[in-house]
Image (tube, helix red, strand yellow):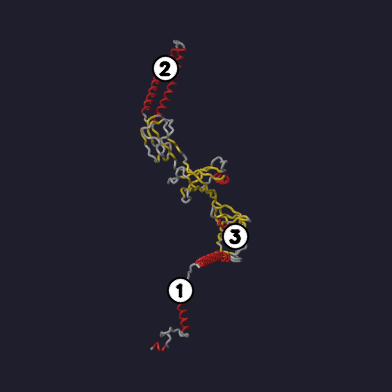
Amino acid sequence: MKRLRTLLGIGFGLAIVAGAGWYISQSSTAPPARQAGRFAAGAAVPVGVATASKGDIPIVLRALGTVTPLQTVNVKTQITGQLTEVHFKEGQMVKQGDLLAQVDPRPYDVALQQAIGQQQRDEALLKNAQMDLERYRKLVQQDSIARQQYDTQVSLVRQYEAALVIDQAQVDAARLNVTYTKIVAPLTGKIGLRMVDKGNYVTMGDASSICVIIQVQPISVLFTIPEDSLPLVRQRLKTGENLEVRVLDRSQKNELAVGRLDTTDNVIDLTTGTVKLRAIFENADESLFPNQFVNVRLLADTVKDAVVVPVAAIQRGQPGTFVYLAKADDTVEIRVVELGATDGEKVAILKGLKVGDQVVIDGVDRLRDGAKIRKPMPAPRASTGPPVANAAPDAQAPAEGQRRRQQANGGTGAVPGSGAGRPATQTNQ
């Protein structure tokens, strides 16, 4: 008996499982059948349409670029000595000619004085030699001395004159070294981190600089474009036009600056088939930082008065490049088109469409040539009539209710238990 109960329980459980499986299978297969019936043969397919219009298509070249300073200077000493003063701060903006640092000038002041003394000594010797030469000239005219003695004196005067030239050069060199003890900014720009501190002994052969100055106003951006786009850019540059360049941040959400294209490189990179371009930006707000990665948008040209449609309308398949043209009888036709320039959202149609044609932009995956479509219903326009017109349905509701009450009460219109059905005379009484 116990074994029989077990077998009955197992059988009952298997029956429940089998029934549940059959129900689930029937439920899962039913929706596709119903779904397939929604768009049966001959049914209109709901689509979204857009109208071809006339507009301008900007030809924008997109590229990746790097912010590059127009000038970068490593400031180094031109003499040897101890750094006694530092007059700049890290990250400071400096102007050309501003004093940055001071090298101990005392050794060079002494050298300048020595050169000046040597020059004065040679000037005195030259003056004495010139006086002797004048006396020898008179004596030679009187034939009182040998001609050779006169010629020797002439040569001595020339030696002293040459010595004075050398002395003057030494004095100028000593003065220049004194000038070099003051290290000044060679250009206007921003100073980076200090590399040498006060008290260090600096020489011309030092590997490290005192500081680095970078020009940030204006600043440039280097970027590359394909060589196929180069002829259009060069043609615009030859005519003297200023091509607008916009730069965006890494996320391409924020526009950083607007500038102009300055020049192109003189060679094409054979390995990549691209050419470098440089754009100039005023950078008054310092939004561009040296070596910053940016996204570049170069406005190379603008196509005027073109027939444009959304890019979503363009399809590609066995006929080629085509669109689904929405006809007046709510059917579609495959229309092969020739594409022109695009800005990413709109595309110019060179052949195949005219202004006013409607093309399908949504629901194209269920279309074929000659298929019926259902266009979106136009939004109802707001009523311009008096507000009373909107209240008409509400005003009819009481009248309809009164009519039904009359039918229920034999046409008298009275409500049971009320005095609405009494004669008029009784009401007056």
Amino acid type, mark 1 = Ala
| Image mark for residue 324 | 3
Residue drawn at (43%, 19%) of the image:
160
Find residue 351 and report its horizontal and vertical position in percent. 61, 55
Q: Are marks 2 and 1 in contact (CB under 8 Å)?
A: no
Find residue 423 and report its horizontal and vertical position in percent. 42, 88
Find residue 131 and report its horizontal and vertical position in percent. 41, 17
Amino acid type, mark 3 = Tyr
Q: Is residue 378 visible?
A: no
User: Mark 1 and mark 3: span between their CA atoms?
Assistant: 44 Å
Amino acid type, mark 2 = Ala
Residue drawn at (43%, 84%) of the image:
416
Q: Is residue 237 above or below residue 102?
A: below
Q: Is residue 129 above or below residue 194?
A: above
Tell me the quarter of the picture where residue 143 sits.
top left
Q: Secondary structure at mark 3?
A: strand
The residue wearing badge 1 is 391
The residue wearing badge 2 is 129
Q: Is residue 368 above or below residue 158?
A: below
- Which mark is first along the chain, 3 or 1? 3
Binning the other alpha carbons within 10 Å of mark 2 as few (below 14), some (14 to 19) or many (20 upward) gives some
